[in-house]
């Protein structure tokens, strides 16, 4: 049976692991071919291990195991030339572009990098998202779907009040929401849709690392995952500690497919109710 993305091509950033890999595999299972991009390198202000080329190769292996084609490129979303070269190469090989998933992100919350971490969060999590969409734009036509990854942090009052990377992350994600809202209005007459997904606490290496455990349990010397988990859970109103990457991929699939063909400008929260009852004033609806 043909999948809902049969014959389509998706460009996904941050695709080496975590949610990006999950999106690549989920969309491939629905028939999409994939252009998978990742920096595959460490950034100085990020105090947890970032993805490797071996991770990106594993994503490719999983997509190919579904009998789909994949083009992988190592590229930094902060580097427009690298990113444009990557998407152009992918389109040249796969023939078209229908879906853009601007997912790459960092969470440089460690205390030691100060305002450098603020700028790194903003250049990757906001400017990188805009650049991803911009380099892809000339390949898109009516029916295309753009999906940008925000965060529940985008709409949570108080997040980032400690300054540095946390403040940069919150600013970047808030502005991703606004970018999606305004770009959706810009591209609607061309029948190109633009939507955001805002994840809760997701079980990926961005959350499951010692730096994050320390953020959640600053009272402990060497906190473990078990020490941090009650904190992860307490942010969700539904009784769940972390969501699976695939929970976000299902939302991405809906937004990528024609099942949502008249949905644009949506801020789709997949956060187990974390934001319910919170003031999200100023966030685009
Ligand atoms: N994990 C969570 O709890 C959570 C919650 C809300 C939002 N998010 C967002 O979800 C998205 C995916 O994160 P994840 O949870 O899969 O984390 P992750 O760290 O497992 O994956 C992020 C990927 O992006 C890549 N990347 C980082 N900087 C890049 C750059 N400059 N250029 C290209 N690639 C780069 C990394 O190498 C990595 O493979 C991010 O935008 C993140 O902010 C995550």
Image: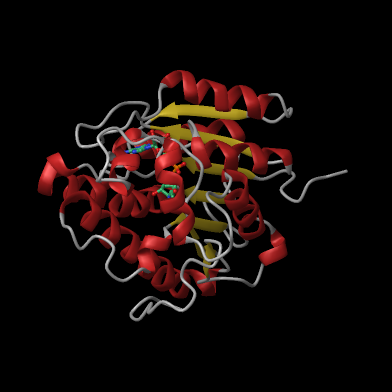
**Residue 139 vertical placement versus 263 (above, below):** above
From the viewer's perspective, is 168 left or right of 70?
left
**Residue 116 vertical placement versus 189 (above, below):** above
Q: Quadrant of the N terminus?
A: top right
The residue sitting at the right extreme is 1
Residue 151 place in picture, x, y as percent:
42, 58
Of the pair 84 and 41, the residue shown nearer to us:
41
Residue 39 place in picture, x, y as percent:
36, 31
Residue 174 place in picture, x, y as percent:
33, 65
Residue at 34%, 50% (x, y): give it: 131
The answer to whether residue 159 is seen in the rendering is: yes
Q: Quadrant of ligand 1?
A: top left
From the viewer's perspective, is 97 left or right of 175?
right
Residue at 54%, 68% (x, y): give it: 273
Query: How many dots with numbers?
Result: 0
From the viewer's perspective, is 21 left or right of 217?
right
Residue 7 place in picture, x, y as percent:
72, 43
The residue sitting at the top extreme is 54
Q: How is the image coloured?
A: secondary structure
**Residue 194 vertical placement versus 282 (above, below):** above
The answer to whether residue 207 is seen in the rendering is: no
Of the pair 250 and 13, the residue shown nearer to us:
250
**Residue 70 vertical placement versus 128 (above, below):** above
Residue at 37%, 79% (x, y): give it: 279
Residue at 53%, 75% (x, y): give it: 189
The residue sitting at the front extreme is 220
């Amino acid at each position: 049976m043909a999948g809902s993305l049969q014959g389509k091509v998706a460009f996904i950033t941050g695709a080496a692991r975590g949610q990006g890999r999950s999106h690549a595999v989920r969309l491939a299972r629905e028939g999409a071919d994939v252009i998978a991009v990742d920096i595959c390198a460490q950034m100085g202000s990020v105090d947890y291990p970032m993805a490797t080329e071996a991770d990106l190769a594993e994503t490719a292996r999983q997509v190919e195991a579904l009998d789909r084609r994949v083009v992988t490129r190592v590229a930094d979303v902060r580097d427009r030339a690298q990113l444009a070269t990557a998407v152009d190469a992918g389109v040249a090989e796969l023939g078209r572009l229908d879906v853009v998933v601007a997912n790459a992100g960092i969470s440089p919350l460690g205390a030691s990098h100060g305002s450098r971490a603020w700028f790194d969060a903003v250049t990757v999590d906001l400017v990188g998202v805009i650049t991803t969409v911009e380099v892809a734009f000339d390949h898109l036509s009516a029916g295309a779907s753009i999906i940008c990854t925000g965060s529940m942090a985008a709409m949570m009052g108080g997040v980032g009040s400690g300054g540095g990377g946390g403040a940069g992350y919150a600013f970047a994600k808030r502005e991703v929401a606004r970018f999606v809202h305004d770009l959706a209005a810009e591209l609607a007459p061309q029948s190109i849709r633009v939507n955001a997904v805002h994840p809760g606490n997701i079980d990926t290496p961005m959350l499951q690392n010692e730096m994050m455990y320390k953020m959640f349990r600053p009272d402990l010397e060497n906190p473990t995952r078990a020490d941090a988990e009650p904190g992860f859970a307490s942010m969700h109103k539904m009784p769940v500690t972390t969501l699976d990457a695939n929970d976000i991929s299902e939302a991405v699939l809906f937004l990528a497919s024609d099942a949502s063909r008249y949905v644009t400008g949506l801020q789709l929260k997949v956060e187990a109710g974390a934001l319910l009852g919170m003031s999200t004033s100023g966030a685009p609806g």
